[in-house]
Amino acid sequence: MPGASWAVIENGEINQIGSAGVVESGGSAAVTPDTLFQAASISKPVAVLAMLRLVDRGVLDLDEDVNRKLMSWQVPPTGSWQPLVTLRQLASHSAGLTVHGFPGYRADAAVPTTVQILDGVRPTNTFGVRVDLVPGTQFRYAGGGTIVMQQLLEDVTGRPFRELVRELVLEPFGMSDSDYAQPLPPELHARAAAAHDELGCPLDGKWHVYPELAAAGLWTTPTDLAKLAIGVQRTYAGTADALLSPELAREMLRSQIAASQRIGGLGHLGLGFFLDDSGQRFGHSGGNAGFRCHLLAYRDAGQGAVVMTNGDNGVWVVTRAFAAIASAYGWEGYPQDVELPDLPTDDVLAELVGAYRLDGRMAFTVERRGSGLEVTFDGQPPLRFMARSATRFAVGTGTELKVREGGLVFHQDGAELACTRE
């Protein structure tokens, strides 16, 4: 993990900020509290807050079919059935839409428009956004639904999403170091942390570009995200500077549907934010290529924190940091169990190095790379298999190597093939 930055909230104010490490592996430039990180999916609740401000003004309706106001694109029929999708469902990931997340684009790649992303046509690198579950029936995380919301906001206001959210959320909360700028303007490159893969190597071009602004496009700092959390706390409390009406603020932090667990025991979805069982904690995680981060705050207690990292292994840093902050600041009810990576030992890794044949046919070699393996199949460039546990290594194609009785077994597409040493 090359670097990290954090901010801690206590008594409704930013109590502590800090940073560690470097902005790019192999370099000497240190991460500072002003270093910019990609917020990844923490972009989503910011976008939802902008949407809720338009609901408050009567421009949008939480429970109206979004196709009634979408002009540039429409949620398409599924066969002969035209599903009805609402903003409430989009904001709570219960609309039954496809496309979980987005891999981003290399800095030199062609970037699609929002409509091209929704349709899944070139140069888009994801499938089109479609309904394949009955809307409102269950939780399924769908960044694709957030892009539908982004297009709707632009259609009803006639304004670019970046400009609209700056006016509705970023400026009112004093988030002066935050911007949905994709690609990042050259004048800000010197302030930005480079993204790193699981081996701690910088990505080509330093980071990916995310035209999926509402879902993944925010550049920011932990301090600015702490301002967001404080703003939400104050909005829920109904202070004079609240951005939403009391009714809508309570709806935002009310459980809409049960969800899969996030850091800090967040297992429900409100509107934009994940919530814990009691409704006291709210937050959101983020994971773009080479960045991992998390925001969590207490609705009423005036506490919270944000931790941002510039590496794919950052989840381990984030998890341990939140446990340490919760302990130091006496966060009530915060789960203290910390899941640590179960990595293979040096002896196991050394034993696996060598030459093999797959199912008695294809030759391949195994070399150690950090806590993982570099595997070269005959006629193919090397593949990096990362350790997912002490006995399991995986590559992004869905292929795995598992340790069994001191040897290796190959798993791919439901098939299991023996690996014999040469």
Image (spheres, rainbow, N blue to C red):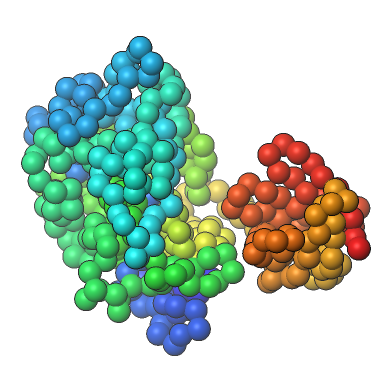
Q: Quick check: can you spot residue 140?
A: yes
**Looking at the image, residue 334 lies above or below residue 142:** below
Residue 103 location in percent, x, y?
43, 52
Of residue 331 and residue 25, the one placed in the foreground of this image is 25
Which image quadrant is residue 157 in? top left
Of residue 124 and residue 160, the one placed in the foreground of this image is 124
Q: Pick the quarter of the image with the N terminus.
A: bottom right
Measuring 30% from the left and 54% from the top, which residue is drawn there?
111
- Outermost residue, top direction? 80
Residue 307 location in percent, x, y?
42, 62
**Looking at the image, residue 232 lies above or below residue 219:** above
- Outermost residue, front direction? 379
Residue 242 location in percent, x, y?
15, 45
Which image quadrant is residue 389 in? bottom right
Of residue 278 and residue 357, the one placed in the foreground of this image is 357
Which image quadrant is residue 353 in? bottom right
Q: Pick the quarter of the image with the C terminus.
A: bottom right
Measuring 18% from the left and 48% from the top, which residue is drawn there?
161
Measuring 79% from the left and 41% from the top, which residue is drawn there?
416
Measuring 88% from the left and 51% from the top, which residue is drawn there?
360
**Looking at the image, residue 14 lies above or below residue 189:** above
Question: Taking 92 as reference, is 346 left or right?
Answer: right
Residue 292 location in percent, x, y?
46, 59
